[in-house]
Amino acid sequence: MDVLAPAEAPPTRSYGGPRRSGAPVRHGNHLRDAIGELESLPLLEATRHRALLLVADDRHCHQELISAAEADIALMIAVLRQANRHESVQRGTVETVADAVGVLSAQSVHGIVSNASTFDFFESRTIWDTTVAGARLHAVATQHAASVIASRIGYENRDRLMVTSLLHDIGKLVLVRAYPGYPDDVHQNASTPEARVHRERIEFGIDHTLVGGVLARRWDFPTSIAGVIEHHHTPDSDLESTIVRLADMLAHYQRGADISPGEIMAVAGTLGLDPQHLRQVMYELPEPAAARERFPEPCPLSARELDTLSRLATGKVSKEVAQDLGVSSSTVRTHLHNINIKLGVHDRAHAVIHANQRGWLNVPWGGQPPPLESVVGGLSAARDQDDEAAA
């Protein structure tokens, strides 16, 4: 049965305000139309500008592009949806923005960003743009709170949490499009998140969490993401849903909205946060989110290959690297050949850039590697010397 059009619902009627009869609204047509409109959810103009610059620059930082997509609802949805439908992966298995960007080519990301509509902080022209802007503010606040909570309790699946916490309320955007008067006419005097969800269930027979979960599945998002969206207001749910539930409460608290102290302490308790620890989390929330350490992509190189590349990154020729490692120059060139194959590059300069962007390089001299511009020049000269020596 289609959850968006339950068979037992009464005949469709136009929705112009809160119901008085107590009968659920038949919502199938309303929601299908609204879901279709969310296919063109606008990007924040600043996100579009930043992403285009990163994609256009051959030396762009992989992590910066991921961070840009993690901070914008529309861009996150677009890259996850396209990655989960990509021919190279099993449909519905890409859980994180990092994995999605890894699946898609730079040209694909460029196409997504170039073709998207946008809205701006100070130039919103429609009620819809204003709604999306407000939704983004709450989503980012929830994402920040979720990151603080995850750090406090030692939750490791942070990259997926960045997705589920940003998209947790995506169902509300569907309801806004489907029903004029939502949320004010529906929520009425409901002052807490739990009470507002209860009002939605009374009014529609569904709530924004169910709509969001259905939407995520229709976009071929993994069940792990759809489940958190669907259960982030469900008591005694899984760990990640509970983190998002608490983060959502804290985000509402940050903007001065009412929350239930008893409810928030109870949810925090299920995560092992006693009142004192909860106070510490709430104290940290106004501060900007610190850049988190990502779990690096698995390095496909062997230890010796990585050691070889690290030395080549300094501009050394194969003979010098061979002396350092106690092997022949031909062995070093064999390592470099295998490195290029494993990384999908054609020369040592691109191999160094590729490995450096992913944090794989083990710089043997200590400290930080030199700027990539000088590295490329040095590597080109070293390569020429190697070619002359081989000739």
Image: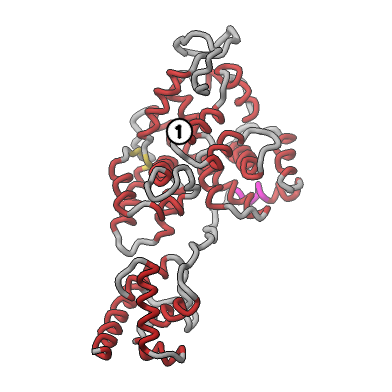
Residue appearing at x 48%, y 40% in the figure:
221
Q: Report the span colored magenta.
A: 281-285
Is there any visible trace of residue 250 in the rendered image?
A: no
Pick the front one: 17 or 320: 320
Say above or below: 144 vs 171: below
Tell me, yes or no, whether the highlighted magenta stretch contains residue 368: no
Q: Secondary structure at mark 1?
A: helix
Q: Position of residue 128 (x, y in %)?
A: 39, 29
Is there any visible trace of residue 275 in the rendered image?
A: yes
Residue appearing at x 71%, y 46% in the figure:
271
Dot 1: few (<14), some (14–19), or many (≥20) neighbours within 10 Å? few
Q: Position of residue 240 (x, y in %)?
A: 62, 44
Q: How many marks?
A: 1
Q: Relative to 20, is 50 on the left or the right?
A: left
Pick the front one: 244 or 206: 206
Quadrant location of the C terminus?
A: bottom left
Q: Position of residue 107 (x, y in %)?
A: 29, 52
Pick the front one: 244 or 192: 244
Magenta stretch, main secondary structure, is helix
- The answer to which quarter of the image holds residue 42 is top left
Residue appearing at x 42%, y 77% in the figure:
369
Say above or below: 194 vs 305: above
The amino acid on which the numbered mark 1 sits, given as a three-letter code, is: Arg
Q: Relative to 51, is 66 on the left or the right?
A: right
To which residue does mark 1 refer? 218
